[in-house]
Image (cartoon, rainbow, N blue to C red):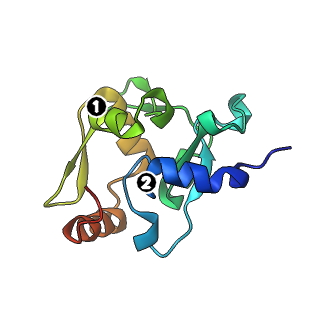
Amino acid sequence: MVQAESFRQFVGARAGGACEYCRLMEAATGVTFHVEHVLPQSKGGETVFANLALSCPGCNLAKGDRVVGVDRNGDEQPLFSPRGYESWLLGWHLHFVLDRPSGLILPRTVIGEATIDTLNTNATNRVFARKLQTQAGLIG
């Protein structure tokens, strides 16, 4: 059986070393990011390059095997899928905006809302880290 870790170098390069959900840079966090299944294996996702994403531990652990979240109206929405767009960064900008001064990720869409809330991307420690990485010019 193929292991997701065997794709680490390629997944990390495609992501530019950033979490594909919250944009934190792996090299500046001091932790190893996860190679995660966008469509979880428990939901039929395969361990193939097209179904893998680079994810910080915070995003990956919060996501778990979820594929939907709840928007601020209480409606279920699919979570953001970085593999649904070419490039993933373009897709990210369709659903989110980074408020550079505060480090907060703000939603542009209901998918963005559901993803931000489900993955807890604006937890205090993650906002602080993102703000520092932005100020250092690591997050563009």
**Secondary structure under badge 1?**
helix
Residue 121, horizontal then vertical, whole percent: 37, 52
**Circle nearer the N terminus (1, 2):** 2
Q: Which residue lies furthest to the right in this view?
A: 1
Disc 1 marks a residue whose amino acid type is Leu
Q: In this view, does 124 lie above or below 21?
A: below
Residue plotted at (32% across, 55% down): 122
Q: In this view, does 32 lie above or below 67?
A: below
Residue 17 in view here: yes
Observer-nearest of 138 and 128? 138
**Secondary structure under badge 2?**
loop
Q: Is residue 48 above or below residue 20?
A: above
Residue 10, horizontal then vertical, whole percent: 59, 50
- Count of numbered circles on the image: 2
Observer-nearest of 81 and 137? 137
User: Which residue position is annotated with label 1?
Assistant: 94
Residue plotted at (53% across, 60% down): 57
User: Which residue position is annotated with label 2?
Assistant: 16
Observer-nearest of 134 and 75? 134
Residue plotted at (77% across, 49% down): 3
Disc 2 marks a residue whose amino acid type is Gly
Quadrant placement of the C terminus: bottom left
Residue 38, horizontal then vertical, whole percent: 57, 37
Q: How far apart are marks 1 and 2 (CA)?
A: 18 Å
Residue plotted at (72% across, 33% down): 46
